[in-house]
Image (tube, rainbow, N blue to C red):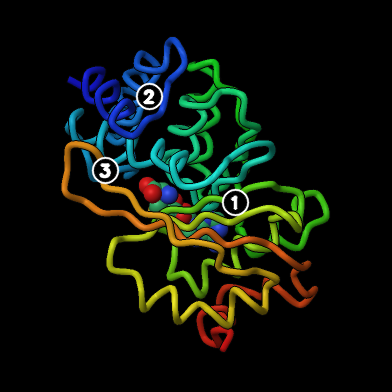
Amino acid sequence: MLENIIAGGASALGISLPEGAAERYRRYFEALLRANRDFNLTAIEGEDEAARLHFLDSAALLTVAEIGGEVIDVGTGGGLPGVALKIARPELHMTLLDATEKKVAFLDKVTDELGIPCRCVCGRAEELGSEPEYRERYDVALSRAVARLSSLCELCMPFVKVGGRFLAMKAGDCATEIEEAGPAIEKLGGRLADVGEYVIPGTDIARRVAVIEKIAPTPENYPRRWAAIQKRPIK
Ligand code: SAH
């Protein structure tokens, strides 16, 4: 059962959850399933799997780095990791960004129904990253399953304040991907501070999180358009 898996998993990770969190995860799961009938938000339809692979996976970020203040989840899709993290830490100021209108409409509705106010924004990261309202305004940027790290850095780093961090959730075997992203990390004002690691409780799935500190402002010519980011990766 979802509630038990969340409770057991959180304690295995050493994370305490606020009152009402399990019920919110349940309602969020049900909303995801309902919306999934109309458009694709998740490939996971079983509650045990969703509890582990979506909710605990997201909450586990709290074991990797300190997360506080203004947070943006870039390419959040159905709200992962952003909504799952906001349920675990309601005090976070969470912005959920996605390029697909339908997904953002879903996020607006579900975060309202769950009483976990988030700023839900429809737009492309590489466009908003140049706008003063968003550029270098966030303490933490998060992202899961959006792009390869070298390109993802260009989408995410512009949002982060100097002194803030970008946390990129990756699969266990991402050593090459991280190495290949070295020049992009540096060029965009970052420094690879750590590669966090955890196993999602109740599974044997290892997850890595690249923790990238922002140590200098991102040069003004970044981010570029998506076609350029892909065609001419920073080397
Ligand atoms: N993070 C979620 C969704 C991953 S799917 C999860 O882990 O389940 C990738 C999502 O990123 C899609 O919803 C897509 O609309 C969004 N996306 C891709 N490129 C983007 C961009 N340049 N700007 C904003 N959103 C983007």
Which residue: 68% across, 39% down? 70
Q: Amino acid at mark 2?
A: Tyr
Mark 3 / mark 2, whichever is N-terminal? 2
Q: Quadrant of the C terminus?
A: bottom right
From the image, tell me which residue sits under label 1: 141
- Front residue of this view, candidates 72 and 209: 209
- Image x and y of residue 39, in percent: 34, 41
Horizontal relation, residue 178 to residue 49: left or right: right
Relative vertical location of residue 179 with respect to residue 26 in this rendering, above or below: below
Mark 2 / mark 1, whichever is N-terminal? 2
From the image, tell me which residue sits under label 2: 28
Q: How many marks?
A: 3
Q: Are marks 1 and 3 in contact (CB under 8 Å)?
A: no
Occupied quadrant, residue 154 = bottom right
- Secondary structure, mark 1, is strand
Which residue: 17% across, 37% down? 202
Q: Amino acid at mark 1?
A: Ala
- Secondary structure, mark 3, is loop
- Image x and y of residue 156, in percent: 60, 60
- Image x and y of residue 147, in percent: 44, 66
From the image, tell me which residue sits under label 3: 200
